[in-house]
Amino acid sequence: MTGSGPRPRRHAALALLALASTLSAGTALAAPIERVDQRGQYWVFDDVDGSVEAAYWFDREGFLDGYQQVEDGFLAVHPDDSQFLVVYTTWSLPAGIGAFFQSVANDVHGIGYEHIALEDAVIPEPYFDDTPNSQVEGFLHLNRWTQYLGDDPGGTNDLTISLIFGQELGHAWGSFVYFSQDGGPGELGLLGRAHAHWSFYMDTGGSPMQGHTWVDNGDGTFTAHPTDLYVFSDLDLYLMGLLPAQDVAPWFIIEDPTDCVDAASGDGVCAPVDAFQFEAPTYTVTGTRRDVSLDDVLAVEGPRMPAWPDAPSEFDVSFLLIKRPDEALSYEQLAALDGIVARSIELFELQTRGLGRVVNRTQSDDPPPPPPEEGTSSGGLDDTAGSGPTEASTSGDTGGTSGQGAHDDGDGGCGCRSEPASDRGPALGLLGLLALVTRRRRRRAAP
């Protein structure tokens, strides 16, 4: 990590999209999760009374109720050394939600939290601390773990991981910023879905925060190309505190799109700015190019504080699998999730061009237990638990909901729901001193 002294807090999280009116508000039961196993890359916990599975994550009260059972159970058996908690489950989130990020504290300035806080259903204000008794700054619910499996047994789907894990962790810092040119309103021109993802028509080079790799054809048309791996843009890296302002290259957005050519539809109708997916090998649009620089963003947001190189470049993360008490995972399933977590960490470093790094605080150097002898149980979930596609793994989007970071299909809060990429391309898809000496006070950045 660059810089010295206590690690500054990261951003306020993204309130999740309050789409499911059929879900019950609030958590009926409330018992902390309990640890049952420790793997090489993650820890396994039981949702002892179903309060995590039943949690209503999409308003402030419901989120805090559900989250508290995770934090309390985790910190009861693990040191308070993590900025982010990443949760996988053996069940699925409500249909249409592939994953979400929710910030639980923020003290970073210049990244647009003043805007998103007004729309986020969970965070109370731009600079806040909902976890005064812990170091945790953000919560990633990555949904049913099997959506990250590849086609080969035990393999991983790198495109899905780079989109969902990359986007949900990226929502700790973006995408919420406005811009202005010559005192004019550029404001929302960079933003798409839920004002928490980049516009469909923004040239991001194929960022997990959305937008596309757009090529200016020089004749008033522009063509988007899919990507093999989602990689953060210069603007993303600046907002994350990983890139100095002077190194952020200008980019462009396409205004007034017309005559869109998507070979999958062929109807000439242009995608809205809050779209993400296109099915054709390429997507061509006629429009007006508007060039944008970081100075245009700074005119509205001011500089990031803390900025590179004082901002952290390493992020302490703990990974949890939460299951129902009566479920048992096979040895092969447990090992597969070890691979998913390890690959997510590797890909994040690639996505940040080696500028950012995840430190896995649940990693163990002890070798995993050997597979059970044939005919004996592994003591985990049965072989069907956690297998097969999830609702979110077959369709949807990955990004924020109404607010900060959810990938969803609706409007509303500020969560980050994500839906994985399809097989062929992009997919649619958030301190006082403690009695415990293991908990350290977080210092807020100066305004």
Image: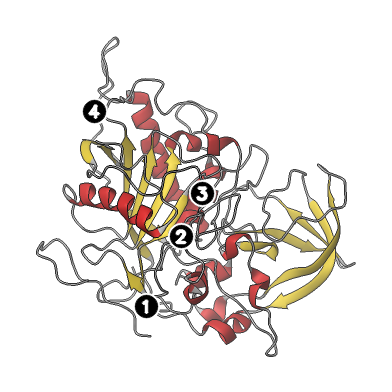
Which quarter of the figure is the N terminus placed in?
Answer: bottom left
First along the sequence among labels 4 and 1: 1
| Local secondary structure at mark 2 | loop
First along the sequence among labels 3 and 4: 3
Q: Nearer the viewer, residue 38 or 398?
A: 398
Residue 39 visible from this viewpoint: no
Question: Which residue in the protein does label 1 denote?
Answer: 310
Task: Tell me the CA gap for discs 3 and 2.
Answer: 16 Å
Q: Position of residue 425 (x, y in %)?
A: 67, 44
First along the sequence among labels 4 and 2: 2
Task: Tell me the CA gap for discs 4 and 1.
Answer: 41 Å
Nearest to viewer (mark 1 / mark 2): 2
| Local secondary structure at mark 4 | loop
Look at the numbered discs 1 and 3 and tell me whether their residues touch, using CB distance below 8 Å: no
Disc 4 marks a residue whose amino acid type is: Pro
Nearest to viewer (mark 4 / mark 2): 2
Question: Which residue in the protein does label 4 denote?
Answer: 369
Disc 1 marks a residue whose amino acid type is: Asp
Task: Tell me the CA gap for discs 1 and 2.
Answer: 27 Å
Task: Tell me the CA gap for discs 4 and 2.
Answer: 39 Å
Which quarter of the figure is the C terminus placed in?
Answer: bottom left
Label 1 crowd bin: few (<14), some (14–19), many (20+), radius 10 Å: some
Question: Which residue in the protein does label 2 denote?
Answer: 15
Look at the numbered discs 3 and 4 and tell me whether their residues touch, using CB distance below 8 Å: no
Label 2 crowd bin: few (<14), some (14–19), many (20+), radius 10 Å: many
Disc 2 marks a residue whose amino acid type is: Ala
| Local secondary structure at mark 3 | helix
Q: Position of residue 174 (x, y in %)?
A: 51, 66
